Image: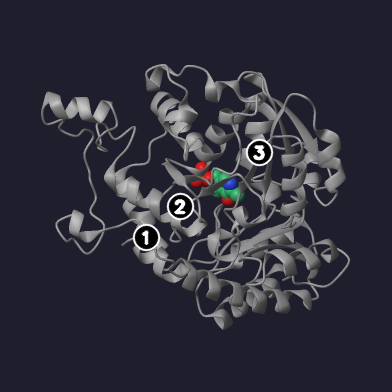
């Protein structure tokens, strides 16, 4: 399909990046399950090396099935290029390293995915990368105050986890750009259907495609997308412009003017650290992609119905979801109107009124909801972050992240919503027996 014409999201999620006529007219994207590609002859090798001809050599640096997935997310985001990697964590880690390698600083908020939190809290500092933490993600001025001469990027999630806090992406992007650093956004919970971070100034968007993009909890995957609005040649990122041994000691930005960010990750971090997505997994993610908008739309609808049920439930002390109008959610109400006109996703958390013993009985009594750590599945899921995803955090950091002791996080799926409510209802009753 030609990407020049402007198509709607629903068309792109099914068609973008794939031309059947170039693949023996196969209707479904073929799985190029191969480690390596024949070079053909030495003349072709010359053409490949000089980039006169685009081709594949070895799946760690590129594969046609992955290439289609990369083109699809690029089209959906309105970017210039993308890179598929083996997991969301590889996407986050490679993106942060690509800006801050060599001792840079990152500004980050507390309420983020626990894997990203641990990366920023423990592992990146050991590699010499400093992190400035933002306590209150609603306070845009605190981002401004955290900037130093050595800041290399601001990292946020569009829907914080598990606090379910929204952020003023445009205002934070302005802070980043005033200081010549990029805004890197993890848009996993929102999906490109509900929010396109590039529209609000993001420079790099990352996804765990394990979640709603894949949509069926069947495989891990990660995506990194760029739109090339950011000037990597501004003096703060010399590693983008110094002679690069992967491109005949040329300047990477000159060789790949539209896709310097993802190409640098492909040539260095993916090729050398090696978190490659398998072609089969890329296929599963592409299959998931085809129904993304339809699934998300229904999940948002189901979520609102369940949230309305919980808000009035006597065994629930609070519900954190941007459409709930109370003191806890007031900062999110306006942000939701600006950034999430189609709904604020299918993940929310709520406070369980009762002791841990009651929470255990509740979780053990659920018959439909799966008790597990994942989100964005067609199946409805529930977990207690303080005991699972966020259990390694110190108590005060758990609170800052929103992993309160009594908080349960729910990811709403596609089952019949009345059945989901009945399931919660019977489990609440059993929790106090
Ligand atoms: C799951 C998740 C990740 C990590 O993705 P994996 O595919 O599990 O490595 C990163 N960010 C967010 C917001 C996530 O939900």
Disc 1 secondary structure class: loop
Please provide percent x and percent y for residue 130: 72, 25
Q: In whole angstroms, how far apart are the C-alphas of marks 2 and 1?
A: 9 Å
In the picture, the disc for residue 418 is: none
Residue closest to the eye, 415 or 6: 6
Quadrant of the drawing holding the N terminus: bottom left
How many marks do you count on the picture?
A: 3
**Up/down of 410 relative to 392, above or below:** below
The answer to whether residue 5 is above or below residue 163 is: below
| CA neighbours of label 2 inside 10 A, class few (<14), some (14 to 19), many (20+) | many
Disc 1 to disc 3, how far (Cα)? 27 Å
Density class for disc 3 (Cα within 10 Å; few <14, some 14-19, many ≥20) is many
Residue 125 picture location, percent across and down: 68, 23
Position of 327 compared to 390: left or right? right
Q: Considering only order in the chain, which callout, 1 or 2, is on the residue closer to the N terminus?
A: 1
Q: Who is closer to the viewer here, 292 or 395?
A: 292
N-term-proximal mark, 2 vs 3:
2
42 on left or right of 333: left
Q: Which residue is under mark 1?
A: 16
Whether residue 65 is visible to the viewer of this picture, yes or no, is yes
On whether ligand 1 comes within 8 Å of the CB at mark 3, the answer is: no
- What distance separates the C-alpha of mark 2 from that of mark 3? 18 Å
Question: Dots 2 and 1: beta carbons under 8 Å?
Answer: yes
């Amino acid at each position: 399909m030609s990407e020049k014409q402007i198509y709607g999201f629903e068309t792109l999620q099914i068609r973008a990046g794939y031309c059947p006529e170039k693949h023996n007219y196969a209707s479904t994207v073929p799985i190029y399950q191969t480690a390596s590609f024949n070079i053909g002859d030495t003349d072709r090798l010359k053409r490949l090396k000089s980039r006169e001809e685009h081709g594949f050599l070895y799946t760690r640096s590129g594969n046609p099935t992955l290439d289609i997935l990369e083109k699809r997310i690029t089209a959906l985001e309105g970017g210039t290029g993308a890179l598929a990697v083996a997991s969301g964590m590889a996407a986050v880690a490679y993106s942060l390293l690509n800006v801050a390698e060599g001792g840079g600083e990152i500004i980050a908020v507390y309420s983020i995915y626990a894997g990203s939190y641990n990366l920023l809290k423990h592992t990146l500092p050991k590699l010499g990368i400093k992190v400035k933490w933002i306590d209150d993600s609603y306070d845009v001025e605190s981002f401004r105050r955290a900037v130093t001469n050595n800041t290399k990027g601001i990292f946020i999630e569009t829907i914080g986890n598990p606090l379910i806090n929204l952020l003023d992406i445009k205002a934070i992007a302005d802070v980043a750009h005033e200081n010549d650093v990029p805004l890197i956004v993890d848009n996993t919970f929102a999906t490109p259907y509900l929010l396109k971070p590039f529209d609000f100034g993001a420079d790099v968007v990352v996804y765990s495609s394990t979640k709603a993009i894949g949509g069926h909890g069947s495989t891990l995957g990660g995506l990194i997308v760029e739109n090339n609005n950011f000037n990597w040649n501004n003096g703060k990122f010399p590693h983008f412009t110094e002679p690069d041994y992967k491109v005949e000691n040329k300047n990477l930005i000159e060789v790949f003017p539209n896709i310097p960010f993802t190409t640098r990750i492909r040539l260095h971090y993916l090729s050398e650290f090696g978190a490659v997505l398998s072609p089969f997994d890329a296929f599963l993610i592409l299959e998931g992609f085809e129904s993304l908008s339809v699934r998300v739309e229904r999940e948002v609808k189901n979520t609102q119905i369940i949230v309305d049920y919980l808000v009035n439930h006597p065994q629930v002390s609070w519900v954190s979801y941007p459409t709930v109008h109370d003191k806890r959610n007031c900062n999110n109400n306006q942000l939701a109107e600006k950034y999430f006109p189609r709904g604020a996703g299918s993940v929310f958390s709520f406070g369980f009124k009762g002791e841990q013993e009651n929470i255990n009985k509740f979780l053990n009594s659920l018959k439909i909801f799966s008790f597990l750590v994942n989100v964005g599945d067609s199946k409805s899921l529930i977990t207690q972050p303080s005991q699972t995803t966020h259990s390694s955090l110190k108590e005060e950091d758990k609170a800052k992240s929103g992993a309160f002791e009594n908080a349960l996080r729910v990811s709403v799926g596609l089952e019949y919503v009345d059945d989901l409510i009945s399931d919660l209802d019977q489990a609440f009753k059993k929790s106090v027996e």
